[in-house]
């Protein structure tokens, strides 16, 4: 699959250690150097600003999508290729998904997780057939992945749907995995037996 545009979900905070910032910058650079457009939440602060600035500095195209209500709070980035201001969070997520061929989550907070899980659910339900993955940084996602495996063990998530989420420790490895991903044809329901 050819990836022309990748949406990145990440924190409006820089996190506690420079390793998160370095990962965001490495991802932004990698996308730009490989001619992949970055789509993200449009903020100029935290990891959001860092991934965007790195892509821009490396000559990449960066499209930001931000709700009017967050434009000032998240300090909407004024130096992007294009900044689209939308009505709310639902419109933001829908527009980011529309513009993207794949999705990557960097470390972040509740908003990052919510965006990741919504787009993952859309894929599970067959609303899109686009790959998604985590850029693993400093073991950040390990507790989440343990919980996801627990959901499979307890039969709330099918293994093929759990496997939709790729994971790699370098931007190059993750983008390659996303490009090689094949959509699955597994039904959503684990057990259709009536209760």
Image: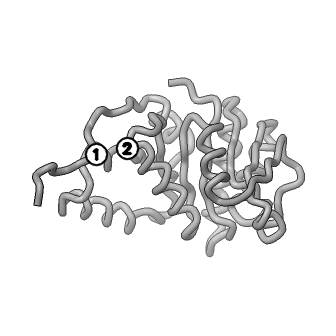
Relative horizontal placement of residue 58, taking residue 153 as reference (left or right): right
Which colour scheme appears in the figure? one colour
Asked whether 194 or 89 is in front, the reply is: 194
Estimate how packed mark 2 is, as few (under 14), some (14 to 19) or many (20 or more) residues with alpha carbons within 10 Å.
Answer: some
Asked whether 40 or 58 is in front, the reply is: 40
- Look at the numbered disc 2 and give the secondary structure of its residue: loop
Relative horizontal placement of residue 141, taking residue 82 as reference (left or right): left
Estimate how packed mark 1 is, as few (under 14), some (14 to 19) or many (20 or more) residues with alpha carbons within 10 Å.
Answer: some
Relative horizontal placement of residue 35, taking residue 149 as reference (left or right): right
Q: Quadrant of residue 33?
A: top right
Residue assigned mark 1: 188
Contact flag, marks 2 and 1 (Cβ < 8 Å): yes
Name the outermost residue toward the bottom.
16
Relative horizontal placement of residue 102, taking residue 153 as reference (left or right): right
**Who's the residue at 63% across and 64% down the image?**
11
**Who's the residue at 66% across and 57% down the image?**
22
**Who's the residue at 58% across and 29% down the image?**
3
Residue assigned mark 2: 125
- Residue 101: x and y in percent read 57, 34
Is residue 49 at all visible to an observer of this figure? no
- Residue 9: x and y in percent read 60, 54
- Residue 84: x and y in percent read 79, 48
Q: Is 78 above or below relative to 82?
A: below
Name the outermost residue toward the right.
78
Q: Is 15 above or below relative to 49?
A: below
- Look at the numbered disc 1 and give the secondary structure of its residue: loop
The mark that comes first in sequence, 2 or 1, is: 2
- Residue 164: x and y in percent read 37, 43
Query: Which quarter of the rendered picture does the C terminus lie within?
Result: bottom left
């Amino acid at each position: 699959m050819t990836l022309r545009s990748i949406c990145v979900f990440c924190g409006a905070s820089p996190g506690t250690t420079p390793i998160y910032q370095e990962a965001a910058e490495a991802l932004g650079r990698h996308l730009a150097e490989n001619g992949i457009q970055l789509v993200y939440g449009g903020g100029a602060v935290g990891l959001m600003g860092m991934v965007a600035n790195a892509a821009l500095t490396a000559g990449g195209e960066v499209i930001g999508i931000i709700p009017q209500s967050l434009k000032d709070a998240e300090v909407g980035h004024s130096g992007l290729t294009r900044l689209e201001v939308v009505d709310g969070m639902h419109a933001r997520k829908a527009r980011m998904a529309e513009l993207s061929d794949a999705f990557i989550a960097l470390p972040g907070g509740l908003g990052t997780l919510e965006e990741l899980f919504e787009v993952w659910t859309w894929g599970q339900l067959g609303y899109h057939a686009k790959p998604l993955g985590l850029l693993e940084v400093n073991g950040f996602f390990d507790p989440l992945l343990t919980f996801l495996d627990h959901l499979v063990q307890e039969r709330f998530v099918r293994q093929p749907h759990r496997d939709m989420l790729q994971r790699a420790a370098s931007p190059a490895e993750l983008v390659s995995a996303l490009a090689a991903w094949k959509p699955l044809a597994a039904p959503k329901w684990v057990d259709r037996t009536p209760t």
